[in-house]
Image (tube, helix red, strand yellow):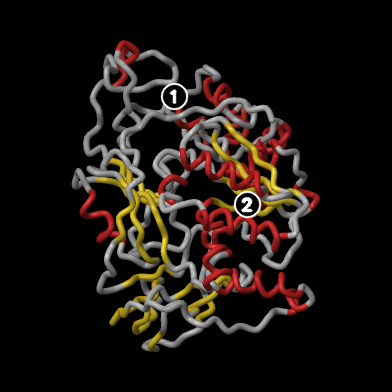
Amino acid sequence: MKFKGGYNVQIKGKPSNKTTRLPDPDLLYLPLFSKRFTFSAFCIHDGDKVVQGQILAEDPDNHSVPLLAPRAGTAKIDPETNHIVLENIQASQEAPKVEFELPDAAKGMGETGEKRCRLLKLGVWQFFSDAFSGDLPDPFGSPQAVIVSAAHLEPFLTSFEALLSEGTAGFEKGLEQLHSLSQAQKFYVILPKIKSNITNKVRDSAKKISGITLIEVPNKYPFDNAKLLARLLQLNPDKGSVWTTTTEGVLAVESALTSSKPAISRVISIAGPAVKSPEHIECIIGYPIDKIVEPYLETPLARIINGGVLTGDTVSGDQKGLDIECAGLTLVPEQAKREILAFAHLGFTKHAYSNTFLSLLRPPFKERYTTGVRGEHRPCICCTFCEEVCPSSLMPHLLHKYTEKNRLAEAERFGLNLCVQCGLCSTVCTSKIEIKQILLEGQEKLLQEI
C-alpha cells in the first residue's frame, strides 16, 4: 500500500489514557437522533417502566437499529425536545435476557444468523458502517471484506490504548468471533506503525488468527479513514459492502456474543484546548452533556463538538444527552472578540503548514486553537498546500472552485467523489477557505442528480 499526504495537526488538549467512570446521574436524556439514525418507531408508551437493555425505539430506515434503555427506570417521551427521558433510575447488575424473533433474512443462516441478530438487538450494530458510503451495512448481508481499524489517528478521539487498558483478551476473542460470523474472504486489521506494549499485543493477536491480514499504516492522520483504506486495499464498491468497525466495536461484539451484554455504555474522550484535564471517561448513553462538560471546562466560553476537531459537528442546542454514536466531546474556546490585525502578527504562538510564522524558531509545541480563523476568508492563492496533504491525491484548490461555480461535471471528472472528508485541506488553507464543507456540499449535489 502506498500512502500519500496526511498531516498530524498539533493542537493542545490531547486526552490521557486514564479512564474515569462517571456515576449515574438523576436523569438520562436519550436523543432520538444521531448522525446516521432517527429513532421514530417507539416500542414503549409514555410513562412505561423499563428495564436495562430494553428496546425503547427503533430506526425503521436502518434495519430497525434499536435505542436501548441504559438503566431501569420510568420512560417519558418528550417529542418537543426529541428525547426520551429516563427518571427514577436504578442500576442493574445482571445482563437482561434478550428475546427476539429471527427476521426472514436470518432464518436460513443458522447459528450465524442468530448471532448477527443478537448483535443488532443488543445495540452493537451501531458500531458498524460501510467503508464506501458510511451508511449502516445490512446485518444479514454478505460483505466482500471487513476492515477493523485499531488505528485512532484523529486528534482527541478515543484511543485504543484507553479502550484496551485492561487487557487485549476481549479484543482477540472479539476478532475471532467477528471473523467467523462475517464469513468474509478478506478480513483486515489496521494498526499504526508504532511500538508499544498494547500495539505489540494487538499485533500478536491478529497474527494468531488464520485468515486475518494485518496492515500497518503510518502514525499519521487520516490513514485510519475507512473509505481511504478500502480504496488503498483495491476493494471495489460494485462488488458489495465493506464492513468497517473500530476497537470499541470489536469489544462490543465480544461482550454481546459471550455475555449477552447490551452496548449501553461508551468510553469517550473529553478533550480539546478548552479542557483543563483532558482524559477518557466511561458513561452510559443519554448522560447529560452539561454534566459531562462542566467539571472539565477551563473557560466559560467554549464550543462543544461531537467527535473530533477535524470531522466532528457542533453539538446543537437542543441535544441534551449523549447520543449512541458519540466517540468524544471536543471543547474549543470561542473567540469572543475579533483578532485585530491578525495578518500582521508575528506568530510566535501559531502553527502554520506554510512555515511562515516565527513559531519556527520555537521548539516543537502544540497550539491552543480557538473557533476563530484568525482573519477574513480570502481568495484562493493556489499555494497547493491542500494538494500536498490530501490523502486521496486530489487537487482541492481546483475542486472547490468548480464546485462553487456549480460545474459539477468537471468536479466529478477531477475526483470529487474520492474526497474522504478528512478536513486537512481546510486546516492548512492559507486563505481560510472552508474547502471541506464546499466539497461535501458538492458530493451531496451529485448524489441528488443520480
Residue 4 vertical position relative to residue 278 in the rendered view, above or below? above
- Secondary structure under badge 1? loop
Q: Residue tagged by mark 1? A: 431
Residue depicted at 64% across the width and 57% down the height: 176
Question: Residue 333 vs residue 167: left or right?
Answer: left
* Above or below, comparing residue 340 to residue 363 in the picture: below
The crowding category of the residue bearing disc 2, from other C-alpha atoms within 10 Å (few below 14, some 14 to 19, many at least 20), is many
The answer to which quarter of the image holds residue 172 is bottom right
Return the disc, 2 or 1, that comes first in the chain's sequence: 2
- Where the N terminus falls, by quadrant? top right
* Residue 170 percent coordinates (x, y): 52, 58
* x and y, in percent, of residue 36 in the image: 54, 60
Residue designated by label 2? 244
- Residue type beneath disc 1: Ser
The kind of residue on which mark 2 rests is: Thr
* Label 1 environment density (alpha carbons within 10 Å; few <14, some 14–19, many ≥20): some
Which of the 4 image quadrants contains residue 271?
top left
